[in-house]
Amino acid sequence: MWLIIMGDVNKTMKYRDCKFYFLNFLFFFLSSHVLAEGISLPKATSCSLKVSPDQQAFMISQCKLAAQSGDKDAQYLLGIYYSDGKLIPPDFSEAIYWLKAASSQASVDAQVRLADMYSMGTGVAVDNLQAYVIYKIASINGSDFAMDQADVVSERLTPQELQQANYILGKAFKGYLKEINQ
């Protein structure tokens, strides 16, 4: 009604112009209202494959785009999809790549999954030193499971490997402290 009155005032404005402005206003109003209410809309980079089988290929391509643009959740999920091989053919080098990308952005779930792969030799050679370091980082980031797993893996390390792992962790944290103090 408001736009029709406005249209009457401005004789040069056509009905379709009013309709266009009304739709823009409506979109702006609704999106502002949703944000004001604190309702979160799904992210455009959502990577859920809980879709019909005929839409999965499209969603995987969307997931890859999101992962390539730096979305750590999409990177983690791609790593899971590639390591599980349920929805897409298994490709452990891709799984490792995407899990490392998500891990470098402090995705605890990705760190744990990556450490699991190194610990069990899933798609890679068993590397207990690497697994221990990644579990320790994940435990510092809040994973109790990773803390327990780091203890389990530490029993498989030689004293020299444990010393090397602690050196790597110490060096990483010194670099982190320098970075946050700048």
Image (cartoon, helix red, strand yellow):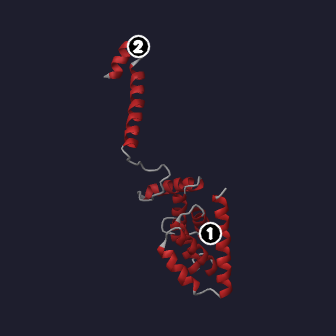
Look at mark 2 in the image and give the residue it sits on. Answer: 10
The quadrant of the rendering that contains the N terminus is: top left
Q: Earlier in the sequence, mark 1 or mark 2?
A: 2
Amino acid bearing label 2:
Asn
Residue 126 in sight from this viewpoint: no
In the picture provided, is 44 more to the left or to the right than 160? left
22 vs 145, nearest the viewer: 145
- Residue 7 on image: x %, y %: 37, 17
In the picture provided, is 61 more to the left or to the right than 25? right
63 vs 56, nearest the viewer: 63
Residue at the far left: name it: 1
Look at mark 1 in the image and give the residue it sits on. Answer: 93
Residue 71 in sight from this viewpoint: yes
| Residue name at image x 52 percent, y 58 percent | 74
| Residue name at image x 46 percent, y 50 percent | 43
Q: Quadrant of residue 166?
A: bottom right
Q: Find the distance from the CA under tag 1 to the CA under tag 2.
A: 64 Å
Q: Secondary structure beneath disc 2?
A: loop
Q: Secondary structure beneath disc 1?
A: helix
149 vs 159, nearest the viewer: 159
Compared to residue 87, the image places residue 166 above or below, namely: below
- Residue 6 on image: x %, y %: 37, 18
- Residue 73 on image: x %, y %: 51, 59
Compared to residue 134, the image places residue 26 above or below, namely: above
In the picture provided, is 136 more to the left or to the right than 182? left
Compared to residue 10, the image places residue 129 above or below, namely: below
